[in-house]
Image (cartoon, helix red, strand yellow):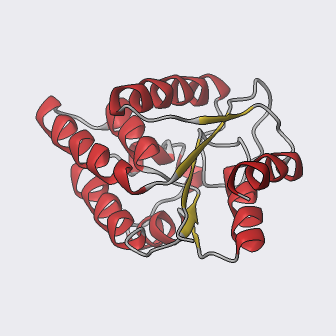
Amino acid sequence: MDIRIGIVGCAGTGKSVFAEKIAATFNVPLLSSKDITGDILIRDGYDYASGIQVERFLSTPERQKEILTRTIAQQSVSSFVTDRTSVDLAAYAILEMDGPLNVKKYVEQCRQLSEVYTHLFFCNWVDGDISDNHKRTLDPWYQFTVHSVEMQVAAMFGLTLINMVEEDAGKRLEIVKNLIG
């Protein structure tokens, strides 16, 4: 059975751990967002200590185009689970990219990519401290804004998000197993 699972949510909601558990359980490849953005951040000399928000650093049209192009290539396999979806990409573009023409074109490309997913699970924003992995913005209100825009993007794309109310990755996994089998 081909499954293409996307985990949607803002930073700090446990997407990566959840995706790892699903990949191991269903024996499908894990497509990690870090494999794409990590390379770009290193190549382009991002310094977390600079105080520049990582999302802003990545928001140039050139970097966003590269992230989307690499995400499309990464998600072209028959089965996978990923901790970055086209919903996430569109939300960050809406929040961070300059120029309505750039954003509109980018969001349309994200909408087209959203058609590949067989299941989309939404990890809810949690009001509280975000663990510092030196790769994400720690401002909980910024993450709440991302969360809200992701919900709007999913609605705009006509997608059904399966809401993961549980915060525990193990409990989330049980929900996925019951839905997918």
Q: Nearer the viewer, residue 35 or 168?
A: 168
Q: Nearer the viewer, residue 132 or 155?
A: 155
Q: Is residue 148 left or right of residue 127?
A: left
In the rendered image, which quarter contains the N terminus?
bottom right
Give the percent coordinates (x, y) of residue 104: 18, 35
User: Eyeballing the image, is 78 above or below 52?
Assistant: below
Residue 99 falls in which quadrant of the image? top left
The residue that appears at 22% across and 41% down in the rendered structure is: 108
User: Eyeballing the image, is 98 above or below 144?
Assistant: below
User: Eyeballing the image, is 85 above or below 142?
Assistant: below
The residue that appears at 50% across and 34% down in the rendered structure is: 160
In the rendered image, which quarter contains the C terminus?
bottom right
Residue 131 falls in which quadrant of the image? top right
Q: Is residue 48 left or right of residue 133?
A: left
The residue that appears at 64% across and 30% down in the rendered structure is: 139
Q: Nearer the viewer, residue 49 or 158?
A: 158
Give the percent coordinates (x, y) of residue 47: 52, 58
Give the percent coordinates (x, y) of residue 52: 48, 43
User: Eyeballing the image, is 2 above or below 115?
Assistant: below
The residue that appears at 32% across and 58% down in the rendered structure is: 68
Give the percent coordinates (x, y) of residue 171: 87, 46
Q: Is residue 69 left or right of residue 76?
A: left
**Number of residue marks:** 0
